Amino acid sequence: MAKINDILSEATKGILTEDVLKEIEAAFNTSVNERAQLHVEKALTEQDADYSKKLETLIEAIDTDHTNKLKKVVEAIETDRANKLKAVVVKYEKALNNEATSFKSSIVNEISNYLDLYLEEKLPTASINEAVKNKKAVALLESLRNMLSVDMAVAKDSIRDAIVDGKHKLDEAASQLEVAQKEVAKLTEENKKLSAALVLEEKLSTLQEDKKAYVKKVLGNKAAEFIKENFDYTVKLFERTENERLATLKTEAVAEAVATQVDRPVIEEKASTPVSKESDPYFNAYMGELKKY
Amino acid sequence: MNNNNINNCMSKTKQVSEKQDIVNFLKAISQKKYSEANKYLQSAIDLKVKSKINNALKQNIF
């Protein structure tokens, strides 16, 4: 870059001296410097203002951003702490309740155990057992006395022996009574049989031998009352049977006599049909009467 | 069988009642109601003595 001195010396073609040129140069430089400084200051001022605005905007933006971020952070922290605090509260409440419950039950048990120990010391179980046994024994003895009707008089040895002796005698009498009752029953049975036999013999004494045998066979093992009631009937039954038999024999004899008067002997063959007991009216009547007894 | 069940139920009821008496005793003590505390303590001790007597009664004398 060409200096101002060179330019002026060329323009003036050496009219201006070196000193003037130096002064001009100095003045020019000063003026230029002043103006440059003014421009610089102006530019700096403008730059400051611009930068100030930008900085303010930036700071505001940063503030806003930081504020938002901080709000979010604070909210997040608050939420987190609140949750943690809630968890802590729940945990401690639970722990407190459980511990309180267990403490309550443990202290109740401990007091109960202490009372047990105190009672055991002051009122031993052995003593209680002994007292209860005594009480039970007294009650049992009393009930036994009532049950056995034993009072103080009976509790004496002499009276007790007498009672025992009396009991033995009562037992013996009871056994003797039992034997006697058995003998009485046996004798009564024999008496019945004998009286029946006697009645039968009395009634049979007037009868013929065949009737006697028949009636004895029929009524031999019956009771006396039965014999008295049915003796006549049995005898009548025998007589009817005997009459029937005689009538049959008579008919047969007549038939044989008629047959001997004819020249030619006639032989009649009869199929003798066995007379069944069920078709016999006397048999049924007799059995019917006997079935009543 | 039924008697055993009834005895067990009665025993449990007595234990519950005894513990309730002790709880009430502690409550009364904490509230400085000493008259009530005395009443509950006496009731608890009575139940304990009755329980001991009942146990003794279950034993045969022979």
Image (cartoon, helix red, strand yellow):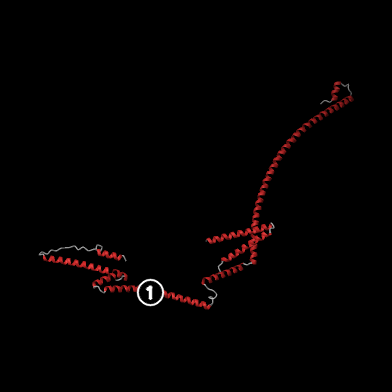
Q: Position of residue A131 (x, y in %)?
A: 60, 69
Q: Residue furthest bottom?
A: A158
Q: Position of residue A53 (x, y in %)?
A: 76, 32
Left-right relation of A159 to B17: left
Residue type at tag 1: Val
Specify the quadrant of the image occupied by residue A126.
Answer: bottom right
Q: Which quadrant of the rendered structure holds the C terminus of chain A?
A: bottom left
Q: Position of residue A240 (x, y in %)?
A: 23, 67
**As displayed, is residue A220 above or below residue A98?**
below
For label 1, the residue is A184
The tally of labels here is 1
Q: Position of residue A256 (x, y in %)?
A: 14, 66
Instruction: Please name the residue shown 42% across and 74% down the image.
Output: A177
**As displayed, is residue B26 above or below residue A84?**
below
* Classed neighbour count for the residue bearing mark 1: other residues with Cα under 10 Å, few (<14), some (14–19), many (≥20): few
Q: Nearer the viewer, residue A276 or A183?
A: A183
Left-right relation of A112 to A154: right
Residue A202 at least partly seen: yes
Q: Chain of mark 1?
A: A
Q: Which quadrant of the rendered structure holds the N terminus of chain A?
A: top right
| Disc 1, SS | helix
Instruction: Please name the residue shown 48% across and 76% down the image.
Output: A166
Specify the quadrant of the image occupied by residue A48.
Answer: top right
Instruction: Please name the residue shown 66% across and 51% down the image.
Output: A93
Q: Nearer the viewer, residue A235 or B46?
A: A235
**As displayed, is residue A200 above or below residue A272?**
below
Residue A223 at least partly seen: no
